[in-house]
Image (spheres, grey):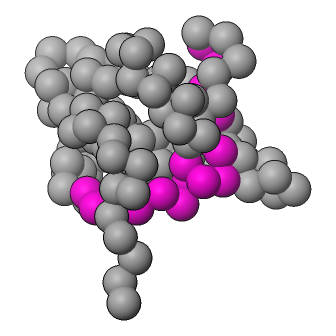
Amino acid sequence: MAPKKNILKLNKLQLRTLALAQVLASDPTTSNKNNETGEVTLLSVPHPHGNHVHVGRFVVSAREASGFSNMAVWTALNRKGLAIISDPLTITLTARGVGYETGLGERFLTESDH
């Protein structure tokens, strides 16, 4: 039986934000992994310029990445045990957050040409 998707009932914005944060967490140039705990701290959260955002080596619509700047999204992910918000500038995905199945895969991702 396939694992059930979205068992924590995240809303669409929370799912998109988590999926994009997982992309950042998978790249050692944009994150720092704690091998003992499995937690991954994001070194920075990208900000939109124009109509897009650079997420690692990918380009994502600014609209799709709007959750990065929404503290309520991060608070919900924290409450559900998927992220740790130690201060407004530091976001860490828990091991559960890194492995959570969003069902979005690479839906929003296009490799950057600049």
Q: Which residue lies furthest to the right in this view?
A: 36
> Looking at the figure, which quarter contains the C terminus?
top left
The answer to whether residue 35 is magenta is: no
| Residue at (22% x, 39% y) in the render | 12
97 is higher (above) or lower (below) than 48: below
Return the residue nearer the eye: 108 or 94.
94
Q: Residue furthest bottom?
A: 1
13 is higher (above) or lower (below) than 28: above
Question: For this view, does 57 lie left or right of residue 79?
Answer: left
Count of marks, rendered view: 0
Residue 105 visible, this angle? no
The segment highlighted magenta reads 89-104
Which picture quadrant has residue 14?
A: top left
| Residue at (87% x, 56% y) in the render | 36
Return the residue nearer the eye: 1 or 54.
1
Which picture quadrant has residue 10?
A: top left
Residue 54 visible, this angle? yes
Q: Which residue lies furthest to the top in this view?
A: 88
> Looking at the figure, which quarter contains the N terminus?
bottom left
| Residue at (40% x, 15% y) in the render | 72
Q: Residue 60's spot in the image, x, y percent? A: 22, 38
31 is higher (above) or lower (below) than 53: below
Q: Residue 113's spot in the image, x, y percent? A: 21, 44
Q: Residue 98's spot in the image, x, y percent? A: 56, 53
Q: Residue 25's spot in the image, x, y percent? A: 55, 47
| Residue at (24% x, 15% y) in the render | 49
Question: For this view, does 21 lie left or right of residue 63?
Answer: right
Question: For this view, does 105 lie left or right of residue 28?
Answer: left
74 is higher (above) or lower (below) than 69: below
